[in-house]
Image (tube, rainbow, N blue to C red):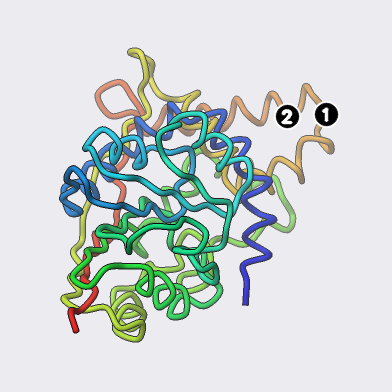
Amino acid sequence: MTNESMRANWTTAADGWVRNERIFDSVLAPFTSAVLAAADLRPVQRTLDLGCGGGTLLAAAVDAGASAVGVDISPTMVAAARTRVPAATVLEADAQTADLLEAAPGPPFDRVVSRFGVMFFDDPVQAFTNIRAATAPGGRLAFVSWRNEEIDTFILGLGPLIARLDAPPPLPVPGTPGPLGLADHDLVRRVLDGAGWGDVAIEAFDGVCDYSLDSSDGVEERLAIALSGSLGRAVRAALEEELGPEGWGLALDDARAELRNHLVDGAVRVVGHTWLVTATNPVG
């Protein structure tokens, strides 16, 4: 089974992600640092980045002296990562089903990392089994995924827009392919145990998502991120044409007002709730 629905989704979503890459990297910096620390990247290691996006972890792996390979299902993301990290190999492929060592010839991977790139598999057990097959014995897996508590952050800034809809788009559902696909602690363990990984550790990790850039209050940055996501894109598609330019502008002003009610020390700052997960590929 392949992730065709996710391929289509990320082909559309990637434009907003790439356009706002600087914001995403700043907002998600605590989680990037957590994954890199857990992975313990070192020179000469071969590192695989799952759902590599625009290449943030790839760049860190290359800076650490590792041989870096990224894989992403979105051609737009792949193009952005190749531009940002020319020293890395970046594959346009589905990590759930692709023969990763055939696509990127070389020894098995010593490290496998991901920042919010592993929650979208149709069959996560199959996916992590396939990934483990490309990992060296004793190789280490480290990733972050959103926790169940994260749903309020996904809709931050969209509330006034959603309230205008007679039939609001569905919110992410925990345990289904999407941002909350691995939101449940017990599900994460079942998936990794079922895929044959060992030494599984699942720890709650919270970080401050700071939307302020260049001393801004973060309102425009948060609104850009909110409208880039699948929920925001659906809301915009339903409202913008109906309201017209002036009405849509007024609706956005309402969204900005909501965000200004969430300023902390003068900027939009919210706590992001994740699981920091590590595991190893058993030896023998």
In the rendered image, residue 240, in percent from the top left (x then y), is placed at 77, 35
Find out whether the residues at labels 2 and 1 contact each other: C-beta distance under 8 Å. Answer: yes
Q: List the single residue furthest toward the front.
A: 106
Quadrant location of the N terminus? Answer: bottom right
Residue, x 60% and y 41% (percent of image)? Answer: 14
At label 1, which amino acid type do we have? Gly
Q: Is residue 183 above or below residue 262?
A: below
Q: Is residue 233 left or right of residue 126?
A: right
Circle 2 sits on which residue? 248
Q: Quadrant of residue 236?
A: top right
Q: How many marks?
A: 2
Q: List the single residue furthest toward the top.
A: 215
Residue, x 56% and y 73% (percent of image)? Answer: 122
Q: Quadrant of residue 200?
A: bottom left
Q: Is residue 220 left or right of residue 163?
A: left
Circle 1 sits on which residue? 244
Q: Is residue 134 above or below residue 39?
A: below
Q: Is residue 150 above or below residue 174?
A: above
Which disc is residue 24 wearing?
none
Label 1 Cα neighbours within 10 Å, binned few <14 / some 14-19 / many ≥20: few
Of residue 164 and residue 219, the one placed in the foreground of this image is 219
Q: Is residue 92 above or below residue 14?
A: below
At label 2, which amino acid type do we have? Trp
Residue, x 62% and y 40% (percent of image)? Answer: 76
Q: Quadrant of residue 267?
A: top left
In the rendered image, residue 157, in percent from the top left (x then y), is placed at 51, 38
Which secondary structure lies at badge 2?
A: helix
Real-space Cα separation, disc 2 to disc 1, in angstroms: 6 Å
In the rendered image, residue 212, in percent from the top left (x then y), is placed at 35, 23
Which secondary structure lies at badge 1?
A: helix
In the rendered image, residue 33, in percent from the top left (x then y), is placed at 22, 41
Of residue 189 and residue 99, the one placed in the foreground of this image is 99
